[in-house]
Image (cartoon, rainbow, N blue to C red):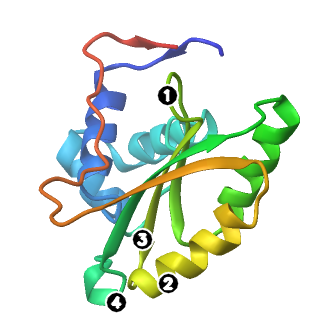
Amino acid sequence: MPTISLDELDLRILEQLQSDSSLTNLDLAEKVHASPPTCLRRVRRLIKTGIIQKQVAILNPTMLGNGLTAIIEITLDRQSAGHIDSFQAKANTESAILQCYRVSPGPDFILIAQLPDMAAYHAMAHRVFTSDVNVRNVRSFFSIQRSKFDTRIDLPRQSNLR
């Protein structure tokens, strides 16, 4: 991946957008002490280079009837590239699964799912896990309290990223 040079203005823009991506360009420019055209040009560059992957609204799952969070460990029987890709594709198409990580060592995947209740979890587990003959082990944990949830990442102090 090529080195992308970020200066202090880029970092200030990213910091503000991590807090509130709904800021208008004028409000963002004011907060980062830049002109609106400069700010707009910088944001477009940050999007084009892939540093900003997407801008979304973060919803409260409990208020929308999806109060069950499941953290799921999956171990596959066969770990060939084709088997891993096949399971990953299946997990990625399931709307209840919000995050899918290939991990090592230990299980092959860690999944984060958000569902309405245990009945919905069991239905999803059957569709994605138990119907897959290559899934050897499923270990699920259910959140009883979320003490932290954040999407912000620490920004570098230096001006070059890889």
**What is the number of callouts on the image?**
4
Which residue lies most toward the right here? 82
Q: Position of residue 118 (x, y in %)?
A: 40, 81
Residue with the mark numbered 3: 114
Q: Position of residue 117 (x, y in %)?
A: 38, 84
Q: Amino acid at mark 2?
A: Ala
Indicate the secondary structure of the residue bearing disc 3: strand
Where is mark 1, residue-wise?
A: 106
In which quadrant of the rendered view does residue 108 lie? top right
Mark 4 lies on residue: 65
Ranked by sequence position, the earlier of labels 3 and 1 is: 1
Q: Nearer the viewer, mark 4 or mark 2?
A: 2
The residue nearer to you, when weighing 96 against 71, is 71
Question: What is the C-alpha distance between the residues marked 3 and 2?
Answer: 10 Å
Q: In screen coordinates, is 60 left or right of 72?
A: left
> Sequence-wise, which precedes: disc 4 or disc 1?
4
Which residue is at 82% across, 40% downward? 83
* Residue 120, numbered label: 2
